[in-house]
Image: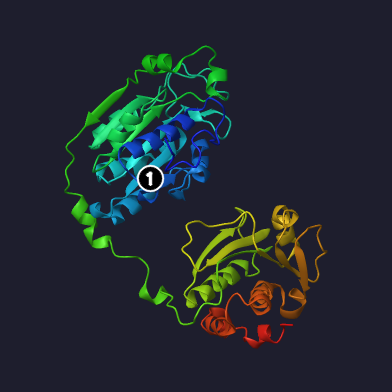
């Protein structure tokens, strides 16, 4: 069977023996049984070990905050019509389900057309094996070797209590694709709780214990229930399906494109020095010429300090991804930027680097162009000057589109365009 959803069903980013791999593989089978194509499926994943599946998926993916994936998926599902033929699937762990339980209850109660798959390995696997509210009596974890008699929350009963249209609990062993396919086929809300044991923490803390034994002892029997859920909630959202994007944000083609093919650009500098704004400006300039563009930003959790980087892709063809492992151009404006980009700099064969003149030349096979950026326009404008330099030297966009785009940029009210044009070689 050729994969449609998974890039490689055997090469998955999980520990050996992890049940998360089984969920991914059975999801592939289930979606094929239902005839879904790659881009008919939107996966929303949560924080946790399961969430690293994103890079193994060919379909649409959204990576949410811890416990918030269900809320994100609810918004997506509410905005889709039944005629779209799209399927929204949430992958979440028992930790995320604990943190985001309110979102789960609301999604089920309002019967959002989506399927939630809980990867329940009964502990927090990504952060060291702490117990969750889904950890049953007698199931030990590294941080709670003598689990108290509190027991686990029964998610199936909770979902049934709020009127979920379809709920099931399955054992995450072998082929359970039929059970997933049945859940995916539901027109409203459905939830599947997949019982697993974490090979890194669960097995080691409970030697000799089998999954079936855990489930039976905890009273978490394999189960399925259907509820003829009322559709009364859906009309309440019918008036909220218009795009949240204002017409004022639409960028229409005004210039003929110069670029043929695809160019990938990495901008890498320091926080607070306009890297993200310069990257957005570059993408907008490309769109003025009728080109496709994506932007992906990178910065530390402590926003405002350290590095700030952005990956921009410009193409004359539709782009179905963001980010790039091998950029064609790197615009590097600070020491923070060098440190962040170093892996790509070292693997820079075929790339061109526009490097601020104050920075030492790194050891790389990439072509280096040193340019006085910071000393000419200051640290806050160095990234923007690097974009002007890129366009001027390599002609990937027209000068006319560049000047027009800058004239509409809010920075132009503070920094005259001559600040950049007069500092081009």
Residue displayed at 72% across by 66% down: 353
Residue displayed at 33% across by 65% down: 243
Residue displayed at 54% across by 82% down: 401
Q: Is residue 68 visible?
A: no
Residue 397 position, x and y percent, is 58, 77
Residue 105: image quadrant is: top left
Q: In this figure, which residue is indicated by the disc labeled 1? A: 70
Residue displayed at 48% across by 77% down: 288
Q: Is residue 56 visible?
A: yes
Q: Check the picture and name the quadrant holding the C terminus.
A: bottom right
Q: How many numbered circles does the render carry?
A: 1
**Disc 1: CA contacts within 10 A as few (<14), some (14-19) or many (>=20):** many
Residue 264: image quadrant is: bottom right
Please state which of residues 148 and 98 is positioned toward the viewer in this rendering.
98
Element type where label 1 sits in the image = helix
Residue 186 position, x and y percent, is 25, 39
299 lies left or right of 188: right
Q: Check the picture and name the quadrant holding the N terminus.
A: top left
Residue 82 position, x and y percent, is 24, 52
Q: Is residue 407 above or below residue 103?
A: below
Please state which of residues 264 and 279 is positioned toward the viewer in this rendering.
264
Residue 236 position, x and y percent, is 21, 55
Q: How is the image coloured?
A: rainbow
Q: Is residue 270 above or below residue 93?
A: below
Q: Is residue 143 above or below residue 189?
A: above
339 lies left or right of 26: right
Which residue is most to the top? 208
């Amino acid at each position: 069977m050729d994969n449609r959803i998974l890039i490689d069903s055997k090469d998955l980013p999980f520990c050996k023996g992890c049940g998360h791999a089984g969920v991914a593989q059975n999801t592939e089978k289930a979606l094929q049984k239902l005839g879904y194509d790659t881009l008919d499926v939107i996966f929303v994943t949560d924080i946790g070990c399961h969430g690293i599946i994103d890079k193994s998926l060919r379909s649409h993916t959204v990576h949410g905050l811890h416990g918030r994936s269900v809320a994100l998926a609810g918004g997506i599902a509410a905005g889709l019509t039944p005629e779209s033929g799209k399927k929204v699937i949430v992958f979440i762990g028992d930790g995320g389900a604990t943190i985001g339980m309110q979102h789960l209850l609301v999604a089920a109660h309002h019967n959002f057309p989506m399927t939630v798959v809980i990867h329940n390995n009964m502990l927090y696997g990504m952060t060291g094996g702490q117990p969750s509210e889904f950890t049953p009596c007698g199931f030990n974890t590294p941080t709670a070797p003598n689990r108290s008699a509190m027991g686990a929350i029964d998610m199936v009963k909770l979902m049934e209590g709020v009127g979920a249209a379809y709920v099931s609990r399955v054992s995450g062993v072998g082929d359970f694709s039929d059970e997933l396919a049945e859940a995916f086929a539901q027109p409203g809300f459905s939830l599947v709780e997949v019982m697993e044991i974490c090979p890194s923490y669960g097995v080691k803390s409970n030697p000799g214990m089998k999954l079936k034994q855990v489930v039976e002892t905890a009273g978490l029997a394999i189960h399925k229930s259907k509820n003829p859920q009322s559709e009364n909630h859906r009309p309440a959202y019918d008036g909220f399906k218009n795009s949240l994007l204002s017409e004022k944000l639409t960028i229409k083609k005004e210039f003929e494109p110069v670029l043929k093919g695809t160019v990938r650009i990495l901008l890498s500098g320091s926080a607070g020095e306009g890297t993200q704004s310069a990257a957005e400006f570059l993408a907008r300039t490309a769109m003025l010429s009728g080109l496709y563009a994506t932007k992906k930003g990178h910065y530390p959790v402590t926003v405002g300090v350290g590095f700030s980087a952005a990956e921009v892709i410009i193409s004359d063809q539709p782009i179905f991804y963001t980010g790039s492992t091998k950029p064609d151009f790197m615009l590097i404006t600070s020491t923070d930027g060098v440190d962040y980009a170093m892996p790509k700099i070292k693997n820079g064969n075929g790339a061109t680097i526009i490097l601020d003149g104050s920075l030492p030349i790194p050891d790389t096979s990439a072509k280096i162009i040193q340019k006085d950026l910071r000393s000419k326009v200051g640290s806050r404008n160095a990234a923007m000057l690097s974009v002007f330099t890129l366009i001027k030297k390599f002609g990937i966009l027209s000068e006319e589109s560049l000047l027009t785009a800058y004239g509409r940029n809010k920075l132009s009210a503070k920094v005259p365009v001559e600040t950049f044009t007069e500092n081009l070689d």
